[in-house]
Image (cartoon, helix red, strand yellow):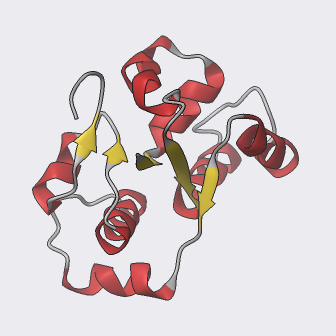
Amino acid sequence: MRVVLDTHAWLWFLQGDPAGNPARRWIEDPAGECWVSAASIWEAAIKVSLGKLRLPYSLSEDLPGLMEENGFVELPVRASHAAQLEGMPFHHRDPFDRLLVAQCLAESLPIVSADRAFEAYGVRRLWGDRG
């Protein structure tokens, strides 16, 4: 199954954070394909630059290797994804999460996330044994 990883899901996975353990089932599925949105990378980079997030690696230097090593596929932000935001209600105020919603809707992909707010948009949310 192809899935989009919410920002916290892929960061927790890369860091081995136990908070991300419920996502492991979906990320480590050998038949699956995990997509990481450019919006999530952008979000993480902004938080690192503001000092709100500390990572044991450099996004600018290490991200390509981390993506390849873990079999993650980059999901670029396309014009159709951005345009999808025009008519979306504000169930979620975070601009990065709203863009992830738009990408999931446009690409008909579920998201691996602990955040239940995605469900208000009709996005299938996967976490732990729930799917």
Which residue is nearer to you in this view: 126 or 85? 126
User: Which residue ends up furthest to the front in the rendered image?
Assistant: 31
* Whole-percent x, y for residue 78 in the image: 52, 81
User: Is residue 45 positioned above or below 91 on the image?
Assistant: above
Q: Quadrant of residue 87?
A: bottom left
User: Is residue 24 positioned above or below 44 on the image?
Assistant: above
Which residue is nearer to you in this view: 59 or 107? 107
Q: Quadrant of residue 114?
A: top left
Q: Quadrant of the C terminus?
A: top left
Q: Residue at x 43, y 16 (%)?
A: 21
Which residue is nearer to you in this view: 55 or 29? 29
* Whole-percent x, y for residue 57 in the image: 79, 32
Q: Residue at x 36, y 57 (%)?
A: 97
Count the labels in the image.
0
Horizontal side of residue 56 vs 16, given as left or right: right
* Whole-percent x, y for residue 26 in the image: 42, 31
User: Is residue 72 positioned above or below 8 on the image?
Assistant: below
* Whole-percent x, y for residue 68 in the image: 76, 43
Horizontal side of residue 26 vs 101, given as left or right: right
Q: Residue at x 53, y 74 (%)?
A: 77
Q: Residue at x 31, y 82 (%)?
A: 84
User: Which residue ends up furthest to the top in the rendered image?
Assistant: 18
Horizontal side of residue 12 vs 56, given as left or right: left
